[in-house]
Amino acid sequence: MMNNLKIGIAMVFSGLLLCANSAQSEEALWLYAKGSDTRPKGSFEVKFSDLFRTGKASADYDFHDLRLEVEYGLTSRLTLGGKVMVFRHDYQVLDEDLKPYVETQGGLGSRFKDTHFGGYDLGLKYNLLSPYKDVVGLSLGFGYENRQHNSLDGAATNQDAIWVGAFIQKNYLDATIAIAFSPKIHHKRRSTPGGLEEELALDLAAGVAYRVNPGWFLGLEFRHQSDYRNPFESGGFNPELQTTNVSLSDLNFSVGSQYQRSNYFGPTVHYASQGWWSTFGALYQLEGQGRAPGVNNIDGRNWSDHERWHIGFIVGWEFGRDNGSNEFEMGDFEF
Amino acid sequence: MKTKNNNQTNTSRRLAIKRIFAGSAAITAGQFFPMSQSWGKTFLSLEQAQAILLPEENLYARTIDLSDTQRKQIAKESKVRVRSNSLRAWVSDKGNWFILDQILGKHENIDMAVAINQNGGVIGLEVLTYRESYGHEIRHPKWRAQFHGRTASERLKLDRDIKNISGATLSCAHVTDGVNRLLKTWELVLSQAT
């Protein structure tokens, strides 16, 4: 499995380098935060990312979240995106309270190591306002995600999620400074041995980046992630998921108290060249907490649902709409 | 669930994963060294742009250095940042000005030239070198023609005065800002120069 994965990655890289056209637009300046740009009409973007999550308080834990994503500009305002996820887990948990890892690895003293198809995601992003001519840039997005394996411990699952998000961007100093804020909410449903679980997952990412040299941006990024479980699951009420006063009755969903959370912060580096762009970042878990029994809260951080470091690398290539052509038709433009 | 007790296999596979990751990161890290390149396309030379914008006119190079006061005043009235305190400009016998300027693209600079007549009106605008991968539509003659005749009496605004090109908004916005800045530069500095 590992050799095939290596060969596959090498082939993807090689193929994309050979085919890449000159371009960069709507590239990611950060790991999680996204700006409001959408793809130019008729252009493609292919992105490969490896988000390496590593480190827990009492575990040898490595997780690679590998993703291959393709985006297409249906119009200059509307982008269609799809991605596939491959998860690579390699961990050995030493704390019997660190669930669900202990069970998945087969008990203390065992090790879990596996590479598997994690799931896929389909989404749309629509641009309402441009940061280059309006007061602020704003895009809205929504999509569907399916997960076949749990990203935390690698156990098999069957989870469906609908997500909605906003992409807000403000530029300063001739767009040499970019600030982005991208909140996202997932509504997840998954089958477990204990019944149906539902939750709202909140993902707030914010970033600032400065163009230090042509092609180069240095940035900082903050990310908050938290979950809110539905206390009425499988027809019963779980008092541990204390109900707040919020009820989404039309959706037959009640929002429980915050189940778990974590906050990350760290630097990013972005480089764009002809044909491709890349972003590298390292985010550190500053703080985290969890309410469920067995949640591993040590030193003010959440080790059950989160890791010490998120180290990410993204490479993007764009295709279509060849630049430099001397011939273009007025009809191609949207005035 | 899979478990492996072969320490040698575990180690080699871990190393393989780390090599892939490190190699990918090295691609980005390696670009830190200034061997990178500007890949832009030059559409016009300086002489070609001068011949197009001010045909058959004798042009005399002028070195224009802006004082701090002038820079601040131009920035204040045009509402556009003035990045350089010097201007590469040429004046003709008829009193028309040819200005070579640079504006920011998303990653690289865009070289453009603007010709302004003795009354402060734009004669024409040309893009000499374009280094970005998107937004090249600003070279279209019909789009650039929107600036002809404009003066410093009106602060041009994208969408209101200058039609935008979808997919090239950043380039359109920065060219519009550049023209605003140069028109104010003519009004406050060049019109007084000999």
Image (spheres, rainbow, N blue to C red):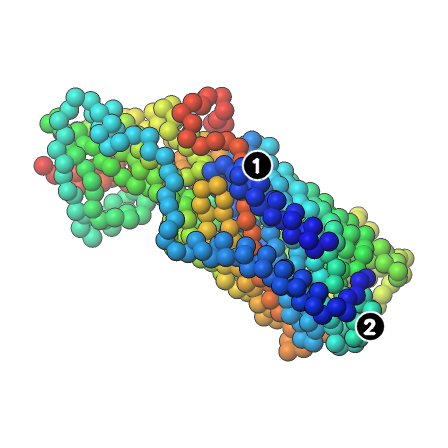
A154 lies left or right of B148: right
Mark 1 or mark 2: which is in front?
A: 2
Residue position for label 2: A107
Q: Where is residue A307 in the image (x, y as percent from the top left)?
A: 65, 67
SS state under label 2 = loop
Q: Which amino acid does label 1 sit on?
A: Phe
Residue A262 image point, x, y percent: 64, 66
Which residue is at a point 50% across and 27% down the rendered structure image?
A334
Q: Can see residue A243?
A: no
What residue appears at the point 20 percent right and 28 percent down from the top-left corner? B117
Q: Which of A314 and A303 is in front in this view?
A: A314
Residue A147 position, x and y percent, is: 76, 51
Q: Mark 1 lies on which chain?
A: A
Separation of marks 1 and 2 at Cα, in angstroms = 46 Å
- The quarter holding residue A241 reads bottom right
User: Is residue B1 visible to us here?
Assistant: yes
| Residue B49 relative to residue A143: left or right | left
The three-letter code of the residue at mark 2 reads Gly
Report which residue position mark 1 lands on.
Answer: A44
Residues packed near mark 1 inside 10 Å, few (<14), some (14 to 19) or many (20 plus): many
Q: Residue at x 75, y 68 (%)?
A: B6
Horizontal side of residue B58 vs B181, given as left or right = left
